Image (cartoon, rainbow, N blue to C red):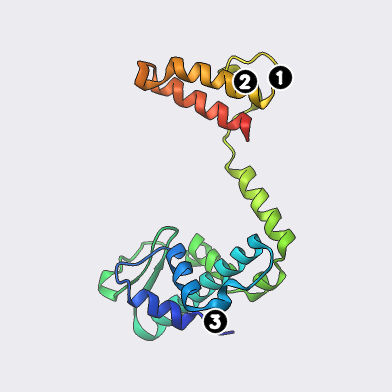
């Protein structure tokens, strides 16, 4: 199915020859297409659908620009931009089908992924993401770093102990930067 956002996104990218972020594309589309802000009642599902539609359009556009114009649409996490054939750096890789880019394209070009994802699934995905980005390590190690003997301290106790040690070890006060960062990591781990 042809994504109706392909044309507007191409126009946006032509107006920004140095490229732009997906977030900037999202902001432009919200201005141009009021219905783009009415895809769901749940705000997380709304954002998922907006993101999916943009990425689907980008991957459709990437394919058609390459096949029809020999132009490469470079899609990265921080910048999306069009490259001419002369600007393209070829890779030695021969395993395109197994690349991360190919897997992302396959996901976003599959309309069933859009249709089957409801508010509960988006919530599950977000929770999984947040658990995945929590700092590595274990609770006991974090408690030891903050010099907390109680295995189940309150958040107030964690915060108080962190502040006490952070003042002592802050680099601006002559403390060691590595110790300070370790304290902050332990604090973030325990507060999450």
Residue found 63% across the figure and 73% down from its top: 39
- The quarter in which the C terminus is drawn is top right
Residue 137: x %, y % from top left:
59, 30
So how many labels did they put on this image? 3
Quadrant in the rendering for residue 82: bottom left
Marker disc for residue 151 = 1
Mark 2 burial class by Cα count in 10 Å: few <14, some 14-19, many 20+:
many
Provide the secondary structure element on which disc 1 rests. Answer: loop
Circle 3 — which element? loop
The answer for how far apart the CA atoms under marks 2 and 1 are is 7 Å
- Residue 3's tag is 3
Where residue 145 appears, as percent x and y from the top left, is 56, 19
Q: Label 3: few (<14), some or many (≥20) within 10 Å?
A: some
State the image quarter where residue 114 is shown: bottom right
Q: Residues within 10 Å of mark 1 (few under 14, many from 20)?
A: few
Q: Judge whether 50 appears above or below 144 on screen.
A: below
Mark 2–mark 1 contact, CB under 8 Å?
A: yes
x and y percentages locating residue 23 in the rendered image: 46, 63
58 relative position to 88: left or right: right
Q: Is residue 6 above or below residue 107?
A: below
């Amino acid at each position: 199915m042809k994504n109706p956002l392909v044309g507007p996104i191409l126009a946006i990218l032509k107006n920004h020859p140095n490229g732009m972020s997906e977030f900037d594309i999202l902001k432009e589309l919200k201005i141009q297409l009021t219905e783009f802000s009415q895809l769901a009642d749940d705000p997380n599902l709304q954002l998922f659908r907006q993101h999916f539609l943009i990425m689907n359009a980008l991957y459709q556009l990437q394919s058609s620009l390459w096949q029809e114009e020999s132009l490469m649409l470079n899609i990265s996490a921080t910048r999306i931009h069009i490259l001419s054939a002369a600007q393209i750096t070829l890779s030695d890789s021969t395993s395109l089908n197994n690349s991360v880019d190919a897997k992302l394209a396959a996901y976003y070009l599959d309309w069933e992924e859009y249709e089957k994802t409801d508010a509960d699934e988006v919530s599950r995905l977000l929770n999984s993401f947040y658990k995945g980005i929590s700092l590595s390590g274990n609770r006991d190690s974090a408690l030891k770093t903050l010099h907390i003997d109680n295995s189940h301290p309150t958040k107030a106790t964690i915060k108080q102990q962190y502040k006490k040690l952070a003042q002592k070890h802050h680099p601006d006060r002559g403390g060691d930067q590595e110790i300070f960062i370790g304290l902050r990591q332990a604090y973030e781990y325990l507060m999450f």
